[in-house]
Amino acid sequence: MTPPLLTLRDIRVCHGAATVLDIPALDVHAGETLAIIGANGAGKSTLLRVIALLQRPMSGSICFLGEAPTSQNSLTLRKRIANVLQAPLLLDDTV
C-alpha cells in the first residue's frame, strides 16, 4: 500500500484554555475525498488552516507524502496546497 498523501497525528489547537481542535489521527490517501462537516465552532476552518500550514498546532505532527514541514521546505509544501474559503476575501464587488 502506498503511503498516505497527508498524515496528521495528535494535532491539538487551543485558544486560551479552550481546546478548539483535537485530532488523534487522520490519514488521506491518493484518490480519496475528504469532507469536513460540523457545527459552527467545531474547528473545521482551524483544521484547514493547520493542513495548509497557515496555523501551527500546539502539539502534534503533519506529514505530506511522509515529509514533515520544516523551515526549509514549508514554502514548497504550501505551494502544493489549495484552500478555498467560503467568504470572498479578495473579490467582494460586482462586475
Image (cartoon, helix red, strand yellow):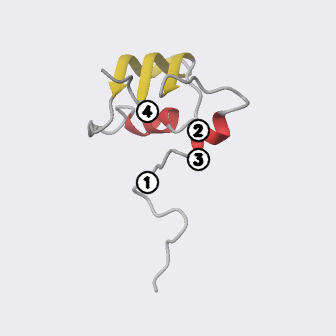
Name the amino acid, label 3. Answer: Lys
* Helix, strand or loop under label 3: loop
Mark 2 vs 4, N-terminal side: 4
Label 3 packing within 10 angstroms: few (<14), some (14-19), many (20+): few
Query: Is 9 situated above or below 44?
Result: above
**Image quadrant in which you'd find residue 15:** top right
Name the amino acid, label 4. Answer: Leu
* Helix, strand or loop under label 4: helix
Q: Determine contact: label 2, label 4, CB under 8 Å.
A: no
Mark drawn on residue 47:
4
Q: Which residue is mark 1?
A: 84
Mark 1 vs 4, N-terminal side: 4
Q: Which residue is mark 2?
A: 77
Q: Determine contact: label 3, label 4, CB under 8 Å.
A: no
State the residue lying farthest toward the bottom: 95
User: Which circle, 2 or 4, is nearer the viewer?
Assistant: 2
User: Which circle, 3 or 1, is nearer the viewer?
Assistant: 3
Mark 3 vs 4, N-terminal side: 4
**Image quadrant in which you'd find residue 45:** top left
Q: CA distance from mark 3 to mark 1?
A: 14 Å
Q: CA distance from mark 3 to mark 2?
A: 5 Å
Name the amino acid, label 1. Answer: Val
Name the residue located 39 percent from the left edge and 22 percent from the top edge. Answer: 3
Q: Determine contact: label 3, label 2, CB under 8 Å.
A: yes
